[in-house]
Amino acid sequence: MKKKKIAVLVGSLRKGAYSKSVANCLISLAPEYFDMNVIEIGNLPIYNQDYDEETIEAYTKFREAVKESDAVLIVTAEHNRSIPAVLKNALDVGSRPFGKSVWGGKPGAIASQSYGAIGGFGANHHLRQVSSFLDIRMMNQPECYLGEIQNSMDQNGVITSERTIKFLQKFMNSYEEWVNQHLDK
């Protein structure tokens, strides 16, 4: 099967971020023909429309990486019941200059997690609202909210819970189907 390039955005910058652990697990569960690459978003200057007339190297590299991808997978934490600022900034950078968004029509999915019980529900749904405007074709089911994610990991941040891995495999299988459904038309 033809390789499919998947842009993975991790909405947390913390060294031991749970989002990174979840992203790594999802990448390990992906089919072999998914070429999944985490695209760095922490180095992007805060979006400013004044920059649309300039060449900002970090913006250019980011936009090209997303544009070259067939699909997107967003793995995020929740900050104050919403999207982490670094993730919102990346979405904004990719959507500009006006009329040149790199997001349009790409199939996508969201996996959110939190230290608390609700698994990043607020971030997940705010992200769906933004993604709708950006025309990212988000997978609706299964939803992926991972509450108390720290209990699914070992001391090195590797997800070891069989229950969590089984759930993430189901999520990845559905995402594979979603991507293929949208790209193999």
Image: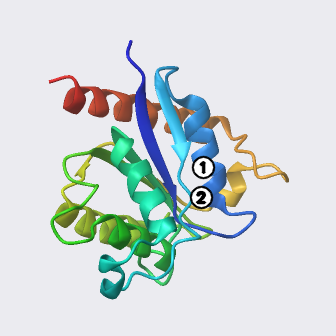
Secondary structure, mark 1, is helix
| In the foreground, 40 or 58 | 58
Q: Are marks 2 and 1 in contact (CB under 8 Å)?
A: yes
| In the foreground, 13 or 96 | 96
Q: Is residue 144 visible?
A: no
Q: Work out whether 36 lies above or below 31.
A: below
Residue 65 % position (x, y): 44, 49
Q: Work out whether 23 lies above or below 166.
A: below
The residue carrying pointer 1 sits among few (fewer than 14), some (14 to 19) or many (20 or more) residues within 10 Å by Cα, namely many
Applied colour scheme? rainbow
The residue carrying pointer 2 sits among few (fewer than 14), some (14 to 19) or many (20 or more) residues within 10 Å by Cα, namely many
Quarter of the picture containing the N terminus is top left
Q: What residue sits right under mark 2 in the picture? A: 19
Q: Amino acid at mark 1?
A: Val
Instruction: Residue 22: give its label.
Output: 1
Q: Is residue 29 visible?
A: yes
Residue 106 % position (x, y): 26, 45
* Residue pictured at 45% horizontal, 34% vertical: 172
Q: Amino acid at mark 2?
A: Ser
